[in-house]
């Protein structure tokens, strides 16, 4: 009896890239930047954080409206003088909003965006599946870091932009005033505010990079966010101890208030430059450790 050979159902061998990857595979095509932007935009913490940045200037404005101005609880004090300045124009209202939010609120917002981005994936158990796509670890970190920094910057812009809008509508458009300088013309005042926002963004890179380092080191997003905020607060406390002398200049928060020099006439930029150098140095160290740690980490969740 003649035998009938079964047809050969084997698939032809696919060409393989010299690097070992399958033909057509491009690392840059994995985890597109805009896909991560949309994923983060759909998250509740992103929506609530950005929403609160819009809401805070409105809360401050309402609080000023309920202030009768007849009591002396704040009068005569430094805070009372700042409140008086805040109600003298939109630029001054914006400056006051930045002042009251720069020491804590913006720190928490930046730590939340950068500390939650990787740790949350690990806590959900989806991080290993992202890496199995496969997404190169360095690209995954780079995309998540860029998106987190973008949302951090957006939160700062939303806070200042909303404050400027509602403050101008309520108190009008007038020169920028401060307790450390004479009146600054409105046009120049806008430039000063932009410079202040830029400096704050650079300083907050320390918080962002530290939170990101903690995010790749733990599966607990709350631990990464809280750890970055607590370390920032600890540094602020230590900076108040004058007995530390010159050692205080090496603390991450030592130059965090140097932006006040941008309000003086003429502007004092020495500490601003030192603050930028310090922030970039800390950010470089923390981010380098984050990439080094994650590329060697055994991801099991």
Image (tube, rainbow, N blue to C red):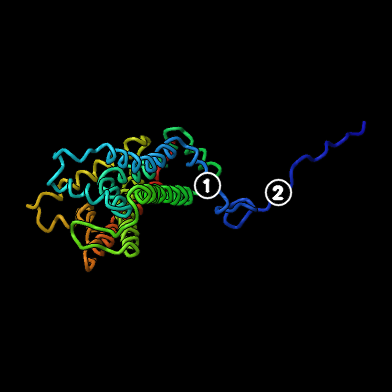
> In the picture provided, is 180 more to the left or to the right than 110?
left
Front residue of this view, candidates 184 and 272? 184
Number of the label disc, if any, that sits on residue 77 = none
User: Picture quarter containing residue 218?
Assistant: top left
Residue furthest to the right in view is 1
Q: Secondary structure at mark 2?
A: loop
Residue wearing tag 1: 135
How far across and down, in percent of the image, does residue 59 sit?
32, 39
The answer to whether any part of residue 290 appears in the image is no
- Circle 2 sits on which residue? 13
Determine whether 276 is above or below 153 in the image.
below
Q: What is the CA distance from the residue labelled 1 to the residue labelled 2? A: 24 Å
273 lies left or right of 198: left
Q: Give the residue displayed 24% in from the left and 54% down from the top.
A: 256
* Relative depth, front residue between 217 and 163: 163
Residue sitting at x 92%, y 30%: 1
């Amino acid at each position: 009896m003649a035998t009938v050979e079964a047809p050969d159902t084997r698939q032809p061998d696919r060409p393989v890239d010299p690097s070992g990857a399958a033909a057509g595979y491009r690392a840059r095509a994995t985890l597109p930047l805009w896909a991560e932007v949309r994923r983060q935009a759909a998250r509740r913490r992103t929506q609530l954080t950005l929403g609160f940045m819009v809401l805070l200037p409105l809360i401050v404005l309402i609080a000023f409206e309920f202030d009768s101005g007849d009591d002396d609880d704040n009068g005569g004090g430094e805070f009372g003088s700042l409140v008086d300045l805040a109600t003298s124009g939109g630029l001054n209202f914006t400056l006051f909003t930045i002042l009251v939010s720069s020491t804590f609120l913006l720190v928490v917002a930046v730590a939340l965006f950068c500390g939650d981005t990787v740790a949350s994936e690990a806590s959900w158990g989806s991080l290993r599946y992202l890496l199995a796509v496969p997404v190169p670890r360095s690209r995954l970190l780079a995309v998540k870091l860029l998106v987190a920094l973008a949302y951090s910057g957006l939160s700062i812009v939303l806070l200042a932009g909303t404050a400027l809008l509602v403050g101008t509508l309520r108190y009008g458009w007038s020169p920028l005033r401060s307790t450390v300088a004479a009146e600054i013309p409105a046009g120049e005042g806008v430039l000063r505010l932009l410079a202040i926002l830029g400096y704050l963004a650079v300083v907050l890179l320390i918080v962002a990079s530290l939170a990101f380092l903690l995010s790749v080191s733990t599966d607990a997003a709350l631990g990464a966010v809280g750890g970055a905020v607590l370390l920032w607060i600890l540094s602020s406390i230590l900076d108040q101890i004058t007995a530390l002398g010159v050692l205080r200049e090496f603390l991450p928060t030592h130059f965090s208030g140097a932006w006040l020099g941008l309000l003086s006439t003429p502007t004092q930029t020495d500490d601003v430059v030192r603050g930028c150098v310090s922030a970039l140095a800390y950010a470089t160290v923390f981010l380098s450790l984050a990439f080094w740690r994650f590329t060697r980490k055994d991801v099991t969740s």
